[in-house]
């Protein structure tokens, strides 16, 4: 499989969107709460991994966007290479959603 600049850009934006969905979006908060506890200190909220042989490493992963991004990139890139017909559609969907979220953030930041 040849990786073009366009496919690299699409996969990268898809990785950004899926990572953001897992680590930050409210829709996945119930999943994160299985592995993280919330702690407030001086008006700031911090997330700490729960104890346990599985919960702790999963909590460490879910509280770090760099860590999650690595594994998401491994998943999406591998899928794009070995199962391009199925993963191509998923990557396109996530890339479009990622571009839309970037545009939305830019509009809110610069125009409102």
Image (spheres, helix red, strand yellow):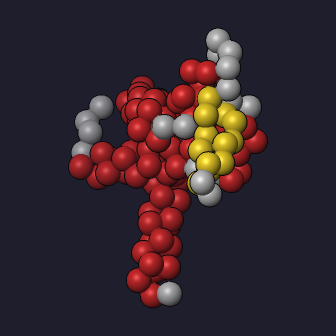
Tally of marks: 0
Where does the image place residue 110, in percent across and percent down from the top left?
41, 83
Tell me the residue at 53%/59% (across/down): 97
Depth order, front residue of 75/50: 50
Tell me the residue at 67%/26% (across/down): 50
Q: Quadrant of the N terminus?
A: top left
Whether residue 1 sits left or right of residue 16 in the image: it is left
Q: Residue furthest front?
A: 42
Q: Does residue 93 sit above or below 110 in this rendering?
A: above
User: In which quarter of the view is residue 32 placed?
Assistant: top right
Depth order, front residue of 86/68: 68
Depth order, front residue of 84/77: 77
Q: Does residue 82 sit above or below 9 in this rendering?
A: above
Tell me the residue at 60%/25% (across/down): 58
Q: Does residue 78 sit above or below 103 in this rendering?
A: above
Q: Residue furthest bottom?
A: 111
Where does the image place residue 4, in percent across and percent down from the top left?
24, 45
């Amino acid at each position: 499989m040849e990786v073009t600049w366009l496919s690299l850009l699409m996969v990268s934006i898809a990785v950004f969107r899926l990572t953001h969905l897992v680590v930050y979006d409210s829709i996945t908060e119930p999943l994160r709460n299985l592995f993280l506890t919330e702690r407030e200190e001086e008006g700031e909220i911090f997330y700490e991994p729960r104890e346990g042989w599985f919960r702790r490493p999963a909590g460490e992963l879910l509280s770090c966007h760099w860590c999650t991004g690595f594994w998401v990139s491994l998943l999406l890139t591998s899928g794009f290479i070995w199962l391009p017909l199925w993963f191509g559609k998923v990557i396109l969907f996530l890339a479009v959603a990622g571009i839309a979220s970037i545009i939305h953030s830019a509009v809110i930041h610069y125009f409102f």
